[in-house]
Image (cartoon, rainbow, N blue to C red):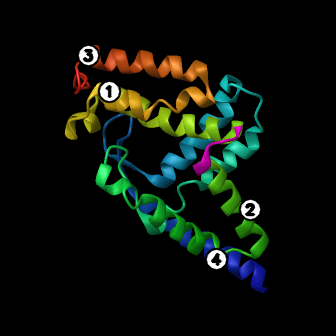
Amino acid sequence: MDSRLEKQIEFLLTIDRLKQIVRRNYLVDASRFENTAEHSWHLGVMAMILAEHANQPIDTAKVVKMVLIHDIIEVEAGDTFAYDEKGYQDKAEREQKAARNLFGLLPEDQAGEMIRLWEEFEDSDTPEAQFANALDRLLPLLQNVHSGGLSWKEHNIHSDQVLKRNLPVKEGSQTLHRLVTGIIQDALDRGLLLPPENV
């Protein structure tokens, strides 16, 4: 193997570990937790199906790339639960280090592209990144509500926490944000979420 191909294969074998990173969200059928590789695949499909609902015209292929690679860093950094305030204290530092290490396995040109896409997703200041982030918030919400709120109940999550978590959806898609607020109200009405904590 030439050295370029060798680096690419090493990267691809390394990211196989993403299948072992277990998230806190249940599958829709509530049979088990999903893993991060499944999450990324699902987001890629969502990007293709829901692209028409973005606030602005977007490069759908770029969004698909973003959502497929944005969580690769969890191979080293692990998954940080959305409502884990302590875990968020060093999340950025852990993930930046992981991004350098993991994408650094690739040939320089591909490493640079992956890091740029990952940083663009994290910064969320382009239409593509904003839409990708909207999808990343929407999917766990859908899974939670359709699995009977299991993850929310296990962690005593309040509706105001979920509303706050999903505010960025509005930046990527007003349409999806309206869907999100309706889902959260429905989940609250059905007792899947605790009432607002600070009311």
Nearest to the eye among marks 4 and 2: give it.
2
Name the quadrant containing residue 166: top left
Q: Nearer the viewer, mark 2 or mark 1?
A: 1
Magenta span: predominant SS is loop
Q: Are the residues tagged 1 and 3 within 8 Å (C-beta)? A: no
Question: Residue 80 appears in which quarter of the rendering?
Answer: bottom left
* 40, 159: nearer the viewer: 159
What numbered label is drawn on residue 160?
A: 1
Do the residues under discs 4 and 2 have CB atoms within 8 angstroms?
A: no
- 65 over 93 or under it: above or below: above
Residue 113 is tagged as 2
Confirm whether the magenta stretch covers residue 104.
Answer: no
Q: CA distance from mark 2 to mark 3?
A: 44 Å
Mark 1 surroundings within 10 Å by alpha-carbon count, few (fewer than 14), some (14 through 19), many (20 or more): some
In the image, what residue occupies the spot 41% across and 35% down? 165
Residue 178: horizontal and vertical position, in percent? 51, 17
Local secondary structure at mark 1:
helix
Amino acid carrying label 2: it is Glu
Residue 91 placement (x, y as % from top left): 42, 59
Q: Nearer the viewer, mark 1 or mark 4?
A: 1
